[in-house]
Amino acid sequence: MKLRTHGLVALATAMLATSSFAQTSFPEVEPNSTKAEATAVTGIVAGDSITGTSTGIVTTVASTLVTTLDTYRIKNSALPLGIYKHTLTITSAVVGHTGTIRGLNQTGTAGTASTGGTPGTVDTLIQTSSTTSVNPPPRSNVWYGFGKQEELYYRVTGGAATTAAYTSTLSTAGITATVLPQAFESGSAITVTTVGQAVADTDIHIYDSNLDAIPGASNDDEGPVGATIQSRLIRTLPAGTYYLAVGRFSTAWNIADPADEDFIGTLMDFPGSLVCSSLTPTTGTDDRDFQISAANGIFNQANTITAPDSYSIQWFQFTTQLGAPPIFTPPPANDNCAAATALPAAGATTAGSMAGATNDGLASCDAGGAASRDVWYSWTNTSPGLRTFSASTCGTTGLNDTVVSIYASCGGAELGCNDDNGACAAQPLSSLVSGISVNPAQTILIRISDKALGGTTQNFSVVTTVGAPAPSNDDCSTPIVLSGPGIYSFDTTGATTGTQGQGLTVACGTTSSVKKDIWYTYTASVNGTVTFSTCGLTTSTDTDTKISYYAGAGCPVPPSPIGCDDDLCVTPTLNTILTFSVLCGEVYTIQLGNFGATANIFGQFSVTEAGPSCSTPFTVFCDGSTIGTTCVACGNNGVAGKGCANSVFPGGTQLVSGGIASVSLDTMTLTTSDMTGPGLFFQSSGLAPTPIGFGDGMLCAAVGI
């Protein structure tokens, strides 16, 4: 079959090359706004063209004006049986025309109550030509056929400047399907799927050996209920040769969607043609890998497009036979703990497969023991604070009877293990390990195993969630006391939106609240200004912070703060910078949070001050200047404001303080003058009723020294 197919494509290619010598032009025939009035283009071959004039997008029945759009009913010329890629490319003196391939709507219900699709009668857009595509050229439309004189509706619209005629020229290329080397067992159902294999939003369609569409053999999103936008089709195919088309969302043929479809798409008007609506990939890569599993094993096919190829569909040929030999499946890349696949930092759904997996670990709740197949994942806490991590296979439509276990390292301590969680109603055999505490920069390992149950079902989904405990300063009654100017870390991941400080009456962005707020108090050490800023200091994806400030300590009293800022930073523009005037020693309450209610924002904020520094006033007591009641040991009284006299300084020694004395913001300094040598400072919680003789001086700090 492989040789015959190649021969047909070679013959067809030769015929396509020769057809260019006898080109035909099909002019439009007005009126042709609607499908019912469409200009017939019958027997078009490569090199032929369609010509017309249109300066608008209007559909008007029976109108012959150039301001209406042009519709054509195209019928390809017969070609030898094979797969063909047809391209219509518009050229004109003035750029501005757009080509579209038309089809029909489809009604129906997808999901748990799926009824499948029912063809509708409403004209529906299937594919729009692009002005920027590289392959095919700009203003091109693409469809696939099989040499069976396929038909479709094609439409051209224009604009006010497109008064010159346009030409749409057809080119056709023969496509050789990739032949899969393995035969699949025909005695039972086989599964064709991109779930857990591809990144792209895929569509799959299956044709028989005569390249006729098989009713019901298509899938866009795995169904009837699926967690992904990839495709899964489970069908029993009699022994024979088949063709598999792998396209992107949305790929249309003329057969209604089956009942196990999770997305009801659009349809072509006529049988035969297959049309992909997606421009992707316009650049870069497009991953459309798939897997076929049958009773005799599993086969994985790499299918990654590495060059621009818009509207493209990839074609594969495979066979089914009774008693097909076993298929060897290589182990997955994450078969061993040391090669664990990294999971997204923020938590997500990741598709996986047990196909070809071996055993690389044990778990306390895994009844399969060393016979269990397993694969490994890793997760690293890249956030600045503690995170709680959960992993489950809930929502898996394939392999859901699993064990999930989590470890501190490869071969390290088991942090959690679960077999049948029951929390997922649809899959009570799925597993869930939750509430694992993970420190910043810590990496944990997640093992998924099949409990040694084996079977042909291989694919599963790992659903991860990441949370955070509420910070200690989540409420304004428990603020963090800032010690002064500096850089401080913050994280709103686990924060809630309290009732205090909301409904702001000052201008602060477009909302009157600070979401997921956390609280601080700050004591000014200057008479001047203080600036709180997150400018360039957030490390999370979301950067939209807000900061408000209030006079005094404790929860703010309505109606409003003194001031607030949302977006004043130069870069990133959604960061916050707030500057306000302060008085020395005054306490201020700071509210820092998000603009949005759901974002998790973390990083650092800075506190800077400007202005003259201030000091806490001090009071002189027990100064040794009162004769008879101070310096009682020797009567060596000093001058006012100083202590007892000494042999060098008859006026006595003086002690003064500077800076701020505070439990949270202590910058106080003690300074002495007129001392004869080293000194010793005493601190107490109270004074002696009368001075106590202490050498040739006196001791007044005498309670709780």
Image: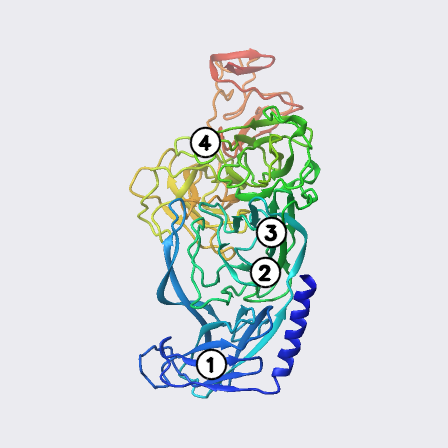
For residue 104, say whether it is visible.
Answer: yes
Please name whichever residue, 72 or 513, is drawn nearer the observer in this view of the structure.
72
Q: How many other residues sit within 10 Å of disc 1, few (<14), some (14-19) or many (≥20)? A: some
Q: Which mark, by number, is residue 423?
A: 4
Instruction: Decide if residue 209 is on the left or right side of residue 629.
Output: right
Q: Are marks 3 and 2 in contact (CB under 8 Å)?
A: no
Q: Is residue 384 above or below residue 626?
A: below
Residue 502 pos. (x, y %): 33, 42
User: Which residue, given by chain and number where applicable, does mark 1 sit on?
Assistant: 41
User: Which residue, given by chain and number where applicable, does mark 2 sit on?
Assistant: 209
Q: Which mark, by number, is residue 637?
A: none
Q: How many other residues sit within 10 Å of disc 4, few (<14), some (14-19) or many (≥20)? A: some
Give the SS element for disc 4: loop
Mark toward the start of the polypeptide (4 vs 3): 3
Amino acid, disc 1: Val
Q: Is residue 687 above or below residue 235?
A: above
Q: How many other residues sit within 10 Å of disc 3, few (<14), some (14-19) or many (≥20)? A: some
Q: Nearer the viewer, mark 1 or mark 4?
A: 1
Q: CA distance from mark 1 to mark 4?
A: 59 Å
Residue 366 pos. (x, y %): 60, 26
Residue 306 pos. (x, y %): 64, 62
For residue 343, say whether it is visible.
Answer: no
Q: Is residue 7 above or below residue 54?
A: above
Mark toward the start of the polypeptide (3 vs 2): 2
Q: Are marks 3 and 1 in contact (CB under 8 Å)?
A: no
Amino acid, disc 2: Ser
Q: Which mark, by number, is residue 239?
A: 3
Q: Nearer the viewer, mark 3 or mark 1?
A: 3
Q: Are marks 1 and 4 in contact (CB under 8 Å)?
A: no
Q: CA distance from mark 3 to mark 1?
A: 39 Å
Q: CA distance from mark 3 to mark 2?
A: 11 Å
